Amino acid sequence: MDLKAFDAFCNSLPATTMVVQWGDAHVWKVGGKVFALCGPWGEERSDKSWKIVFKTSDLAFQILTEQPGIVTAPYLGRFKWVQIQDENAMSKDDLKTYIKAAYEIVSKKLTQSKRTELGLI
């Protein structure tokens, strides 16, 4: 999934916002909390070096980090975030499923009043 498709998918989820921070990373949030990002990591900062990072459940973290092309996200791994390093590590449909799950994990941790304000309940 390229950056344009990543942004379009994250934007399709309810009550999301995007900011560019930490260099050139596109950081997607719900209720001010990050659920996924795509940024240029590594020595080469081209479109091909952009990597997707997202929050996972404990079980998904265990499973995904055993797969080739998926690693514990730098700085975020202790919070069960993964980084897709190889665009062939999973299908685009699976990636969308995991990003949506990340969105749901984060949005469910928002306060009830925040979720109501955002129209999530």
Image (spheres, rainbow, N blue to C red):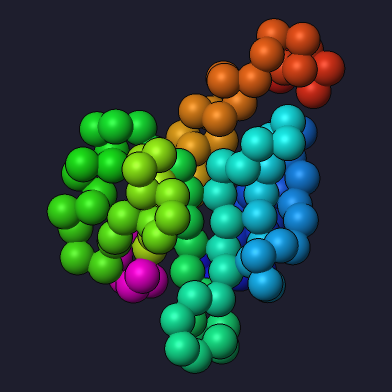
> Is residue 91 among the parts visible in the rendering?
no
Residue 72 in the image: above or below residue 42: above
Q: Position of residue 79 (x, y in %)?
A: 40, 39
Q: Nearer the viewer, residue 67 or 91?
A: 67
Q: Nearer the viewer, residue 71 or 69?
A: 71
For image coordinates 56% across by 88% down, the residue present is: 46
Quadrant location of the C terminus in the rendered image: top right
Residue 28 in the image: above or below residue 86: above
Residue 92 in the image: above or below residue 110: below
Judge whether residue 7 is colored magenta: no
Judge whether residue 87 is colored magenta: yes
| In this picture, residue 70 sits left or right of residue 109 | left
Q: Position of residue 7 (x, y in %)?
A: 67, 59
Q: What is the total number of numbered labels drawn onto the structure image?
A: 0
Secondary structure mostly seen in magenta is loop
The answer to which quarter of the image holds residue 40 is: bottom right
Q: Position of residue 53 (x, y in %)?
A: 47, 56
For image coordinates 77% across by 10% down, the residue present is: 113
Magenta span: 85-93
Which residue occupies the extreme right position in the image? 117
Residue 110 in the image: above or below residue 8: above
For image coordinates 45% across by 42% down, the residue present is: 55
> Is residue 11 among the parts visible in the rendering?
yes
Q: Position of residue 102 (x, y in %)?
A: 49, 38
Q: Nearer the viewer, residue 77 or 99?
A: 77
